[in-house]
Amino acid sequence: MARDLQEIVELAADLLGAPATLEDRDFHLVAYAAHGDTIDPVRMESILHRRATEAVRTRFESHGIARATGPVRIPADTSLGQLGRLCLPVRWNNVTYGYLWLLDDPERITPSQASQAMPLCERAGLLMARQARERDDLGWKVADLLSAQPDVRAQAANQLSEADDLDPPLAVAVLRTPSPEPLNPWLLPHSVLATVWQRDHVLVIPSPTSPHAIVDRARHVLEERGIPLQAGLCTPCASLGQVHEGWLRARVAARVAAPGEIRDWTSLGVLRLLRTAGDEALAQATRTPGTQNLLAHPDLAATARTYLDLAGNVQETAKALSIHRQTLYHRLRRVEELTGLTLADGQDRLTLHLALTLAPHLD
């Protein structure tokens, strides 16, 4: 009878008589058995936050666990309140997929007992390898949902509609990072599908999973490793057939997000125009010789943008820019001179506001 990962961890805990957890090779928590009163801050942090910190990872990996083929004992560290533990590498076909951790401060677990648990680790390695392969296969189907070819998208939607957990409505998230290596699948709930498409991480998140919570979890993990991230969301997509459009919208949201920020398509306002046309076409439609002149003067352009964002409120604009009102009036006159536009005219204000809003996002 096939055993799942949770059952394997509980069997290992019973066999060795010690509290047990299973983590993937990136130290994300996969399963854990009951602990009773035996626990330390490192284990508590792992269970509460579903992953160990980078400091803990570095400390444990310094004992050679990533290359180990057999049990490795990690000594206690009283300065950190860390109990001693035994690490059993979880491997399959000579690949390490994770670690089975036993809290064993008194060192009661003998080498002979530890060796009896290694078949359980091998079984866990097989299951984790199989799940990784299944996620990769589904990732390819998600990539097909994003294809420019309608027939490829339709076929992928039909195949993915049979997935148990992929219930609409769906959210689509785009995570933009400098290097688009695939995200560790254990970072995400099993129901969330991921792929890399056009150098972006793309997640398809089913209901009722919170898309903001999923993206926020990925953001925290990447930021801990010094990887900046811009994230965009589009929700809801009523069907798998709408994921392609959701991806295009989430891409725009990620594009305009600041580093470390998560933007939702619904919050973009006029920036949603970036979805409707290419940069060159939008530049030609929104810029005039006058606005081009203004963009050559960043301070004046920032003044005009702030003034227009605040609906022409002189007092609030001066306060936001930390300048005197007379200085603001002088700058606004210079803006009118450079652009040939009149800020008292609604159409001119719209022209200028649109050009200044889109300008930072156009190549």
Image (tube, helix red, strand yellow):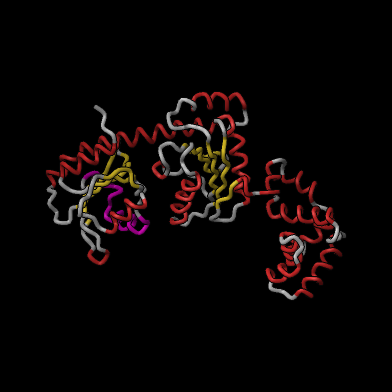
Count of marks overlaid on the render: 0
Magenta segment range?
Answer: 53-70
Do we see residue 73 in this rendering? no
Residue, x 48% and y 37% (percent of image)?
207
Q: Nearer the viewer, residue 132 or 312?
A: 312
Expressed as whole percent of the image width and height from the top left, the position of residue 288 reads 83, 53
Q: Is 348 placed above or below 165 here? A: below
Between residues 142 and 90, which one lies in front from this camera angle? 142
Q: Position of residue 187 (x, y in %)?
A: 41, 45
In the image, 293: left or right of 13?
Answer: right
**Is residue 38 located in the magenta-colored stretch of the structure?**
no
Indicate whether residue 69 is drawn in magenta. yes
**Residue 156 placement (x, y as % from top left):** 53, 26
Q: Is residue 113 among the parts visible in the rendering?
A: yes
Residue depicted at 21% across the width and 48% down the height: 19
Relative to 87, is 117 above or below? Answer: above
Residue at 69%, 71% in the rendered image: 319
Q: Hey, which quadrant is residue 152 in on the image?
A: top right
> Residue 83 appears at what percent x and percent y?
22, 58
Give the left or right position of residue 28, taking residue 161 as reference.
left
The image quadrant of residue 295 is bottom right
In this rendered view, identify the residue nearer to me: 149 or 301.
Answer: 301
Point out the image quarter for the N terminus.
Answer: top left
In the rendered structure, the answer to whether residue 275 lies left or right of residue 239 reads right
Q: Is residue 201 above or below residue 49?
A: above
Choose top left, top right, bottom left or bottom right for residue 360.
bottom right
